[in-house]
Structures are given as structure tokens and as C-alpha cells.
Amino acid sequence: MKIKITGKDLKATDAIKDYVEKKSERLQKYSEDEIDVQVTIKTEGINQVADLSTAINGNVYRAVTENKDLYASIDKDIDIIEGQIRKTKAKKEKQNMSGSIKNVEDIRFSTEDHKVENEILKTSYYEVKPMSAEDAKLVLSERSKDSFLAFVNIDTGKVNVIFKLKDGKNFGLVEPEA
């Protein structure tokens, strides 16, 4: 790990250098490569400002905080950068996950020589909310892409399904008998 500490109107003591090095080790676990950490410390009025930046896995992360205690500023910067790294990592994992699922669906439906019949090809998950049939009708009419809506009928406490009829103007309602 390479650490560069610059002090503006403030001297970077050995204690500060050791503290930054110790705290920066928390960031190393997010990269297999050696990371570079740049720290700029300065005084603004009665506050100590720590500006910490690093590049991990091709992404640049930066945090600037000020506190009366320089060590608290450094701690806060490390926490902020760790949060930024976790957020970026989760975002990339989500993109990779959705991208791979799309590719699998494209492959499944593009094979013309193998026709699948009488199988469940797609499963959708949704939240079933309690509402009246009239409220469900309003919600479904606002959703132009959906042709039906499952909901818990607040009058009966049972799951109902409201759907758009083929005429596009009227609705149907499915209710369980018992």
C-alpha cells in the first residue's frame, strides 16, 4: 500500500502517518492489487480537515471531512470511502446479475429448433396490497403495460384479480367463492 500524506499549514507527524496507514488497511481488502492512498490534511479555523482519495479496481473514491479532531476526520473519511466502495460493488453485482439473466433468456427463446410447450417459462413476483376493487381498477387503469392486478380485497380479506377486458374499456374481477 502506498500512502502519500500532504500537510497544508499542518505538519504530518509520524503518529498521523501511522494512524492513516493503520486505518487505510481496511480499504485493502477490497482490492487484490496494491492501492494508492492520498491524504491531504489542513487546518481551517478551529477544525482539522482530512481529504482522502484512492483508486480501487479502476474507480476513484474521495471523501473530505472536517472535525475538531484530525483523527476523527480520518476515521470518517475511511468510513465514507468504504461505503462508496460497497455501493459500487453492489451496483456492479446487480448489473452483472441482470445482464446474465437477460443473456440466458435470449438464448432460451432464440433457439428455434427446440420448442417448449406446456411449461412455465417466466415467473413474476409482486406485492399483494390490500385495497378495494374500485381502487384496484384505478391502479390497473394507470398501468398501461399491465393487463391484470392481484390484490387483497379489504371487504372480504381474500385475494382477488382484476383484469382488463379485450375491449380495453372494461374490467373483469376474479373472486374466490369460499
Image: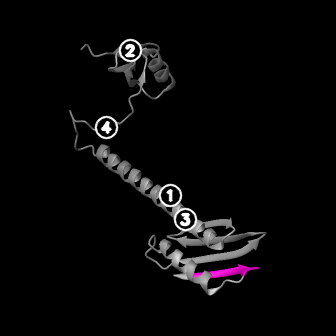
Q: Residue at x 49, y 80 (%)?
A: 34
Residue 163 or 26: which is nearer the viewer? 26
Which badge, 3 or 4, comes first in the chain's sequence? 3
In the rendered image, which quarter contains the C terminus?
top left
Residue at numbered disc 1: 87
Within-10-Å neighbours for mark 3: few <14, some 14–19, many 20+: some
Q: Position of residue 127 (x, y in %)?
A: 39, 33
State the separation of the CA atoms marked 3 and 1: 12 Å
Q: Position of residue 95 (x, y in %)?
A: 44, 54
Q: Position of residue 94 (x, y in %)?
A: 43, 53
Q: Is residue 123 above or below residue 17?
A: above
Q: Is residue 147 magenta?
A: no
Amino acid on which the number 2 mark rests in the picture: Asp
Q: Residue at x 50, y 59 (%)?
A: 88
Q: Position of residue 157 (x, y in %)?
A: 34, 19
Which badge, 2 or 3, comes first in the chain's sequence? 3
State the separation of the CA atoms marked 2 and 3: 50 Å
Amino acid on which the number 4 mark rests in the picture: Thr
Residue 166 falls in image quadrant: top left
